[in-house]
Amino acid sequence: MNILVINCGSSSLKFQLIDSDTENWIAKGLCERIGIDGSVISYTPAGGEKEVKETPMPDHTEAIRLVLEALTNPSTGVVKDLKEIGAVGHRIVHGGEKFASSTIITDEVIEAIRECNDLAPLHNPANLIGIDACRKLMGDTPMVAVFDTAFHQTMPPKAYMYGLPYAYYEKYKVRRYGFHGTSHSYVSHRAAEKLGVDFDQQKIIVCHLGNGASVSAVLNGKCVDTSMGLTPLEGLIMGTRSGDLDPAILEFLANKENMTLSEVMNVLNKKSGVYGLSGDISSDFRDLEKAHNEGNKKATMTLEAFCYRVAKYIGAYVAAMNGVDVICFTAGVGENAPLVRSWVCEYLGYLGITLDDTANNKRGEDIVITTPESRTKVMVIPTNEELAIARETLALV
Ligand code: AMP
């Protein structure tokens, strides 16, 4: 079956059409600047050339219409008719406590997702617009919602409760949820599969290090802790997000810089992380590594702070699980930055980890990067959230 995977943001929309038999993508692309002047759609059929076209996209319905037009285009399309698309899988950022697994989209499910909008005001409304646009244009094609938060719903209260008055949890569901769940699930399963061990009997730590970054602890097949919280701001130092900090900093900065609370939040979300810490060098680790190699001290300190925080979370999750069998690195930085992996692993001698430098310098494959003598295994597993969404979709339709 061909499954269309949609990841809809407020002004962008990523898509992939995946053949569920081969698990290969047959076309993929991106719509950018939806609702803004200068909208652009890029489209790549498997084995073909990438096309980039500037065309007006006043709203998401028009963006989806253009995606479907590209997929069925007689010369560069990959299907003859929309009927050849058997199902659509939608990435939904926040499922709150309502969704512990993926679900077929119905009117009731849409309403329940809408009720989670408060928890992810930037993401969930955009995800819903994507669902609405697909429903308008694709009639009865079954659709599935796959939640970023669902994999983490197995966390116990001791891991997800904040040290706040309990009434806020009762009234507003203020608790830790965690994100990147599709990736943490895919990578931890894949690691067990690759090692030929039983997923349900492993202690796995997944480090999803991309522009957004999070760590999770997967004990005997269930997520027991993760570094992101109510929102994706908590935890690691990220591309532009601060991660953990003393909450008193918000009021302190608001007073000192004469900022409103939402202006401070904007700084924490968009101007902090490795970007802010490096003195605005870049949020991209390639630029930071280059600056570090050229002797830029702020870049070096930023990379050290990033790796130190990752290593501390790994240590915390070793404690939470009373051990670890395998540590996995994934996402843009985790998959592509040997320097980051080796700096993180330098803290992990107490786990008997010895890196295999040749393996650590390879790219683009599922690989063990520790030596055979290493007491704990470290792996690089390229994440594939689209495939994970397609698999969930197939399983439900
Ligand atoms: P993601 O959010 O998973 O797409 O990751 C995007 C980030 O991956 C970029 O912002 C870069 O910081 C990082 N990245 C991508 N390629 C490389 C590379 N070759 N070396 C270091 N970092 C990389």
Image: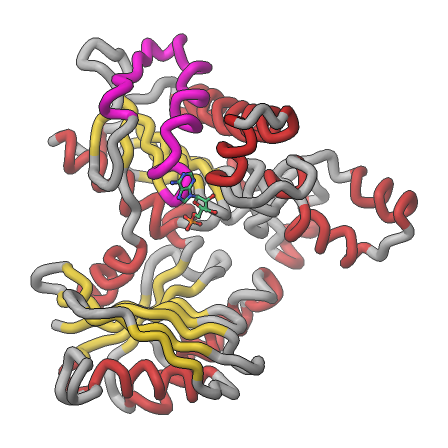
> In the visual, does 368 lie left or right of 133?
left
> Residue 139, image x and y in percent?
28, 91
Figure disc tally? 0
> Residue 118, image x and y in percent?
61, 65
Q: Looking at the image, can residue 263 be seen?
A: yes
Residue 341 vs residue 190, the one in the foreground:
341
Q: Looking at the image, can residue 397 be seen?
A: no
> In the visual, does 362 lie left or right of 172?
left
Specify whether residue 38 is painted magenta.
no
Q: Please name the residue shown 28% across and 52% down the image.
A: 384
Q: Residue furthest left?
A: 21
Quadrant, the N terminus: bottom left
Residue 193 vs residue 118, the one in the foreground:
193
Quadrant, the C terminus: bottom left
Residue 150 vs residue 296, the one in the foreground:
296
The quarter of the displayed image where residue 376 is located = top left
Q: Please name the residue shown 91% across and 46% down the image.
A: 255
> Residue 164, image x and y in percent?
70, 41
Q: Please name the residue shown 66% across and 36% down the image.
A: 277
The quarter of the displayed image where residue 210 is located = top left
Q: Which residues are magenta?
A: 331-360
Colouring mode (rainbow / by chain / secondary structure / one colour): secondary structure
Image: 68 above or below 337: below
> In the visual, does 218 lie left or right of 298?
left
Q: Please name the residue shown 24% across and 41% down the image.
A: 364
Specify whether residue 344 is painted magenta.
yes
The quarter of the displayed image where residue 46 is located = bottom left
Type of secondary structure dominating the magenta stretch: helix
* Picture quadrant of ligand 1: top left
> Residue 111, image x and y in percent?
48, 77
